[in-house]
Structure formats: C-alpha cells, structure tokens
C-alpha cells in the first residue's frame, strides 16, 4: 500500500471518528479539509524529496568514481 493510500485511510478513519463522536458537520468539514490539505502537502514534499534524492545520488557517485580512478 502506497503512502497516498495510507493517508486516505487515515482521513477516512478521522471522518468516521468525527461522525461517531457527533461532531457538528461544519466543524467536521473544516477538520477534514485541514487534514486533506496537510496530506497533499505531505505528498508533495515526499515527491520533491524523492526527486531531489534521485538527482543527488548520481552527483554523489561521480566523485567516488573519480577517487577510485585517481587511486588506480
């Protein structure tokens, strides 16, 4: 299960808990809206970090190769 799926499950669980607790619909909507916004920010941050790591790894590997060539 992916990160997005886990976040979706948690928001669904929050919605169910709010309903079960009898939280007024307007307050529940506000909380769920905030949770959805936070989830989207988390997904974007995860994607940005993943992309940044993908670009950084070859750059880190290049100096090692040069060091090995210099040692030979």
Image: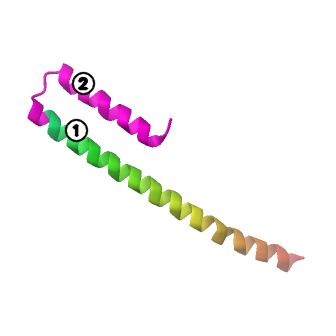
Left/right placement of residue 6 relative to residue 25 reads: right
Residue 66 in the image: x percent, y percent? 77, 77
What secondary structure predominates along the stretch shown in magenta? helix
Task: Give the label on residue 17, or none.
Answer: 2
Residue at image position (84%, 77%) is: 69
In the rendered structure, which segment of residues is drawn in magenta?
Answer: 1-27
Give the SS element for disc 2. helix
Q: Earlier in the sequence, mark 1 or mark 2?
A: 2
Left/right placement of residue 17 relative to residue 52 reads: left
Q: How many marks?
A: 2
Residue 20 in the image: x percent, y percent? 20, 19
In magenta stretch: residue 64: no
Indicate the quadrant where residue 61 lies: bottom right
Instruction: Residue at the far bottom: name it.
Output: 70
**Residue in the foreground of this view, choosing between 56 and 26:** 26
Indicate the quadrant where residue 54 lies: bottom right
> Mark 1 highlights which residue?
32
- Work out whether 27 lies above or below 49: above
Residue 47 in the image: x percent, y percent? 46, 56
Residue 56 in the image: x percent, y percent? 59, 67
Residue at image position (31%, 34%) is: 11
- Work out whether 32 lies above or below 48: above
Q: CA distance from mark 1 to mark 2?
A: 11 Å
In magenta stretch: residue 22: yes
Residue at image position (52%, 57%) is: 50
- Work out whether 44 lies above or below 20: below
- Work out whether 11 lies above or below 33: above
Question: Dot 1, how many residues are within 10 Å of its Cα: few (below 14), some (14-19), or many (20+)?
Answer: some
Left/right placement of residue 57 relative to residue 51 reads: right
Instruction: Residue at the far top: name it.
Output: 20
Indicate the quadrant where residue 71 lies: bottom right
**Residue in the foreground of this view, choosing between 66 and 11:** 11
């Amino acid at each position: 299960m992916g990160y997005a799926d886990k976040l979706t499950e948690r928001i669904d669980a929050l919605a169910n808990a709010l309903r079960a607790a009898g939280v007024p619909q307007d307050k529940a909507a506000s909380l769920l809206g905030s949770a959805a916004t936070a989830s989207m920010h988390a997904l974007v941050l995860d994607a940005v970090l993943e992309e940044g790591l993908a670009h950084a790894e070859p750059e880190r590997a290049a100096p090692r190769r040069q060091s090995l060539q210099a040692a030979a």
